[in-house]
Image: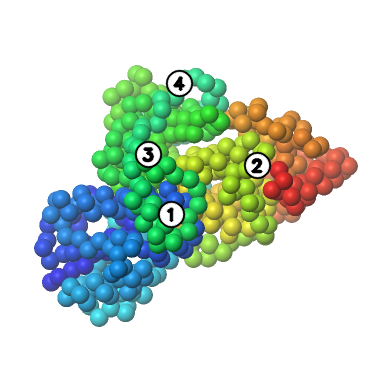
Amino acid sequence: MKTIRLILGDQLNQNHSWFNTIDNDVVYLMAEMRQETDYVKHHIQKVVAFFLAMRNFKKDLSHQGHHFIYLELNDPNNLQDLEKVISMCIKENDVEKFEYQLPDEYRLDQQLLQICESLEIESSCVDTEHFYTTRFELKDFYKGKKQMVMENFYRMMRKKHQIMMINDQPEGGQWNFDQNNRKKWTGQPAIPSEKKFNQDVLEIIQEVKKANVETFGNIEPESFNWPTSRTECLSNLNYFCKELLHHFGDYQDAMHENEKFLFHSRLSFAMNAKILSPKEVIDTVLNHFYEHAKEIDISQVEGFVRQILGWREYMRGIYWKEMPKYKQLNALYNTNKLPDFFWTGKTKMNCLKHAIGQSLDTAYAHHIQRLMVIGNFALLTQIDPNEVDKWYLGVYIDAIEWVEITNTRGMSQFADGGIVATKPYVSSANYINKMSNYCGNCHYSHTKKIGSDACPFNALYWNFLDTKKEHFKNNHRMTMMLSLLDRMDSGKLEELQERATYIIEHMDDF
């Protein structure tokens, strides 16, 4: 029976059981499609990375003897629509069966279900064999519970998969070393430079331009610096273990205007495209830790494991539990427009200048830059979560909806009303100053609340609390801040509100 198997751009798992044997009656179908480049405007580096990773995947598996139909972006046979591409390939190759791996995006899941219903041949789907959890494992775990606290899920995952466990107790005597993971980096220890890959991607960029794909952001065509093959991604993983893991946990929340990556691994694209699996990443990191346990503190490693085994699996579970309604949630009724500087990085606020500028230059920012600088500002200025979602989904090289929307609409913007986070992640300039050196060279003073040179985050913070106080009046985690708000002098609060209103109405002047 001749079979076509579809491989999506984020399903680049060479260790999938599909590839255990070579079958001359099986053809793998891959296509670089406008359907995927155009559903939101993407960073040019994101488009290039996915196309290059797809081509590397096809090349590696073709060398092993597997058969492919691969349609590049400007191939005249590329009909740019998934249903049309599948139907054409079935017809032209006398295919009797169509198979695919479960997509991780709801829209593609629905589209493939509809396509299979329309086909006149047998069809079936299989798991991607990537995640620790099944689609609805989180939903089953929290059944009957009032809140879906991530820590409970994380502990279950540690026990179930026997990761950093001694019998039924956590290694190191505690489950979570988050309190150890909040150091400000002030120049020491020295940060090794990021591992370079320096690939020439001019040809792909020219193909994207020829197709009139609309992108944004910056790229260096002759020195593209993201790993996109399995060999490169494994090399990057090993580099992280040897050079960066020693200090990762301590400084995972730190920010610095001269350091884009600090001790972060830059493995998120490799994992979200499924080039590397979370299990092999965690196993590699833990093996290195156990071999160098005298040199590496457990807090460095637990912080890394928690991000992957905890947050990453948790966010995917939330996505499949709550979609499709999750995409429409706007619990705080925020409707303001995204300022233009999100697309240019041109702002006098130094923290945003660096966090957004870095995002435009590298298609990357780490979780605190995304959450407590960019996301914090978006929430304090009450920007429409639809606009925030589109920007985050487009700008970051690792952004796929299942992980982007739960982090952005949920944790960052609190638009889900508290499904993911128990409180909004907002702060004044004090937090940004505590975790970075951004404030020292800023046009604005992080200590001032009122005046033309006062940091906008300060007035925006108190204005947000006052504007949304009815929404949070029964949230026990907001009690302290709301009580401080209640005790604030009414004249001072009015001044803060006036300045915040002006900032929101003139965001691009700041």
Q: Are marks 1 and 2 in contact (CB under 8 Å)?
A: no
For label 3, the residue is 223
Q: Nearer the viewer, mark 2 or mark 3?
A: 3
Crowding near pointer 1: few (<14 within 10 Å), some, many (20+)?
some
Q: Nearer the viewer, mark 2 or mark 4?
A: 2
Q: Amino acid type of disc 1?
A: Ile
Distance from Cα at disc 1 to Cα at disc 3: 24 Å
Which quarter of the figure has residue 264?
top left
In the image, which disc is placed on residue 151?
Answer: none
Q: Amino acid type of disc 2?
A: Thr
User: SS of the residue at dot 4?
Assistant: loop
Question: Which of 151/394 is in front?
Answer: 394
For label 4, the residue is 190
For label 1, the residue is 400
Which quarter of the figure has residue 82?
bottom left
User: SS of the residue at dot 3?
Assistant: loop
Residue at left offset 14%, top offset 70%: 2
Q: Is residue 36 above or below residue 488?
A: below
Residue at left offset 58%, top offset 54%: 388
Distance from Cα at disc 4 to Cα at disc 1: 33 Å
Residue occupying the far right of the picture: 491
Q: Are marks 1 and 3 in contact (CB under 8 Å)?
A: no
Q: Amino acid type of disc 4?
A: Ala
Q: Amino acid type of disc 3?
A: Ser
Q: Nearer the viewer, mark 4 or mark 3?
A: 3
**Residue 65 shows in this picture:** yes
Q: Which numbered disc flags the more N-terminal residue, 4 or 3?
A: 4
For label 2, the residue is 347
Residue at left offset 13%, top offset 71%: 1
